[in-house]
Amino acid sequence: MARPAAVTPDAIRATVLAMLAEAGDPAPASDTRFRKIVSVRKLRARLGAGDPATLSRHLNAIEAELVQAGLAGFAVPDVPPEIAAQMRALWEAAVATQLDGIVRLRRETDGIVAAATEAQHNAGLKVELLRVELADVRTRLSAREAELAVARAGCEAATQRTTALEDAAGQLQAKLTVAETATASAARQHASALTAERARYDGLSKQLLRETAHQRETFQTERQRLEAELARTGERLAALESLRERLLTELGEERNARQHAAAEAAALATLVEQQRQTLARVGSATAKAQPAGTRRPVRSMAHTTRTMKAAAVTSARKAR
């Protein structure tokens, strides 16, 4: 595709005529005057763009049209000078009108170009802003894509966990159904057992109340009997206490008597022993002093001694 020209020939021509009109020479008399007013450099600076060679070529064509074609010395053969002067004045007026339109068009074009330049500048700024926003959006989009990938992975994992949980929930629901059935059956059995136990408890409660009343009456009777027995036992205990006191007193007296008898028996035994020894000595002395036919009294003395010993033993036995 060919690149469009930066400056059109019409724009070049209009610009050249505008420059001649501004200089006061819409139809310069010579090429020197034309080159003084219009040059390639001035034309390019006025247009703001354009190839110098292209501008020079168009400028030569316009110069040939305006100067070398004899427009400055416009004359028509066989035409009176008055008519030629009127025709020249008419041509100059037409050129001036055209130049005014060209100037006005140039001004409008300059305004349009300025507005377009400003719009282009604003559009460039807007494009840059949009580029920054686009970069920011792309960055956020990349972050969102990463987050979306993570979320998708989490969603897949959550979906798998959800599936596993749903399977587990189904199994638990089945177990729950079985447990509810078993619970309902157990509840019915428990209710029937509770009813039976309640009836049994009511019967046992009534029986217990009757037995409690009977036992209370029996207890009252037994208590009265025991109280009477306790009273008799107390009387017997008092009698036994008095008997015990009396027996203790008698035992003390008997102990004292026994101790006195034992003392007397000991004294008597001592006395008997002394007498026996004395009698033994006397008997020995008598036996030595008397002949054989005179020993009978000695046996009498021994008999007396034995009698005294027997009496002492009897007294000791009675003391015990």
Image (tube, rainbow, N blue to C red):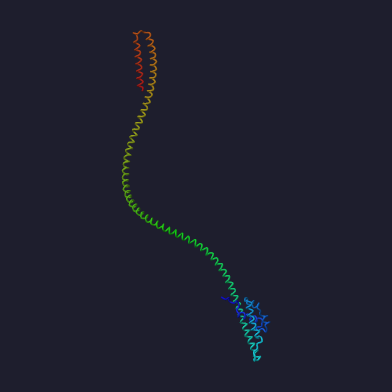
Q: Nearer the viewer, residue 162 or 305?
A: 162
Give the image quarter of residue 291: top left
Q: Position of residue 88 (x, y in %)?
A: 64, 87
- Quadrant location of residue 84? bottom right
Quarter of the picture holding the C terminus: top left
Count of numbered circles in the view = 0
- The percent coordinates of residue 155 (x first, y second) are 47, 61
Q: Residue furthest front?
A: 1
Location of residue 38 with respect to 258 vertically, above or below? below
Q: Is residue 146 above or below residue 218?
A: below
141 and 78: which is toward the camera: 78
Relative height, residue 177 to residue 48 (above, below): above
Q: Position of residue 304 (x, y in %)?
A: 35, 14
Q: Is residue 5 left or right of residue 163?
A: right
Residue 3 drawn at (x, y percent): 58, 75
Nearer to us in this view, 113 or 225: 113
Residue 131 lies in quadrant: bottom right
Which image quarter is the N terminus in?
bottom right
* The one of 38 and 116 positioned closer to us in this rendering: 38
